[in-house]
């Protein structure tokens, strides 16, 4: 079975997808983590997203892998290096949409996650899972929340990591990222026609999970 959870940045997709996967005993795949891994690698090499030749050379030597540690936490590796924490840096968050809009990047990541989902029961989250990556998914959900609520959640995450960022700054960054994701030419953020629209602004994690599990059981 394939379960696709799409939605904008900060909507809680990863948190919900992880819990649903754990409750069902399915493999959780965070597609956004792989795009972040590519963006991190490009930033470290100081490669501009507009420099397609340099980016192509980077991608040729990039091996992306997802696995789980003993506690069930997802581990993201680039060429054998654990980048699970590094990809969550706010600098990566600000540019990942730009890199993920590059066709060659999307082709690489899409092929990798399709291979992971080919022979397993999976829960996958991203922005184009139900519409592009797994169009035949058995269950599709479009999970969202207000910009203010998403910024509040992101603020709590950054504060826990010791980073100081203002609420208004985060709201502006999230709104700008939403626009980039919706307007990009390749695989834009869009709700699949057969996906359930679910606004989590006033819902806790358990409530969202119960909605999705009820949909799966239909």
Image (tube, helix red, strand yellow):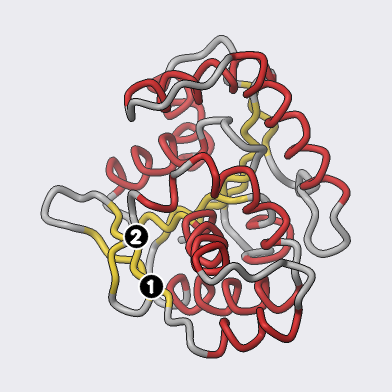
Q: Quadrant of residue 7?
A: top right
The percent position of residue 77, horizontal first and vertical second, equals 34, 68
Q: Quadrant of residue 22?
A: top left
Task: Decide if residue 120 is on the left or right side of residue 145.
Answer: left
Q: Residue drawn at (65%, 73%), measured in percent from left and top?
A: 105
Q: Helix, strand or loop at disc 2? A: loop
Of the two numbered discs 2 and 1 on the same chain, state the one appearing first in sequence: 1
Task: Decide if residue 25 is on the left or right side of residue 190.
Answer: left
Viewer-proximal residue among 39 and 201:
39
Q: Residue drawn at (68%, 21%), measured in percent from left and top?
A: 171
Q: Quadrant of residue 88?
A: top left
Residue 78: image tag = 1
Q: CA distance from mark 2 to mark 1?
A: 7 Å
Q: Residue drawn at (43%, 35%), measured in percent from left and top?
A: 16
Q: Helix, strand or loop at disc 1? A: strand
Q: Is residue 153 above or below residue 123?
A: above
Residue 110: image tag = none
Task: Decide if residue 114 is on the left or right side of residue 26.
Answer: right
Badge 2 crowding class, 10 Å Cα cut-off, few under 14, some 14 to 19, many 20 or more, is: some
Circle 2/circle 1 CB separation < 8 Å: yes
Q: Is residue 174 above or below residue 43?
A: above
Q: Residue drawn at (63%, 45%), measured in percent from left and top?
A: 6
The percent position of residue 131, horizontal first and vertical second, equals 73, 58
Residue sticking out furthest to the front: 46
Q: Is residue 143 above or below residue 82?
A: above
The image shows a total of numbered marks equal to 2
The percent position of residue 142, horizontal first and vertical second, equals 66, 38
Badge 1 crowding class, 10 Å Cα cut-off, few under 14, some 14 to 19, many 20 or more, is: some
Q: Which residue is mark 2?
A: 83
Q: Is residue 183 above or below residue 81?
A: above
């Amino acid at each position: 079975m394939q379960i696709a959870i799409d939605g904008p940045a900060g909507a809680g997709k990863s948190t919900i997808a992880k819990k649903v996967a754990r409750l069902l005993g399915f493999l959780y795949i965070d597609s956004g983590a792989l795009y972040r891994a590519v963006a991190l690698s490009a930033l470290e090499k100081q490669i501009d997203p507009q420099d397609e030749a340099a980016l192509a050379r980077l991608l040729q030597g990039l091996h992306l892998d997802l696995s789980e540690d003993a506690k069930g936490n997802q581990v993201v590796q680039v060429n054998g290096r654990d980048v699970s924490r590094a990809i969550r840096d706010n600098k990566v968050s600000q540019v990942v949409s730009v890199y993920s809009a590059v066709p060659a990047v999307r082709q690489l990541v899409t092929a990798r996650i399709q291979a992971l989902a080919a022979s397993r029961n999976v829960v996958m989250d991203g922005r184009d899972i139900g519409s592009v990556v797994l169009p035949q998914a058995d269950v599709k959900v479009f999970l969202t929340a207000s910009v203010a609520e998403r910024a509040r959640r992101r603020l709590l995450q950054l504060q826990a990591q010791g980073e100081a960022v203002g609420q208004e700054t985060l709201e502006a960054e999230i709104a700008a990222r939403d626009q980039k994701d919706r307007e990009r030419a390749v695989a834009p953020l869009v709700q699949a026609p057969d996906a359930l629209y679910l606004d989590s602004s006033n819902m806790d994690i358990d409530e969202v999970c119960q909605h999705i599990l009820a949909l799966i059981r239909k």
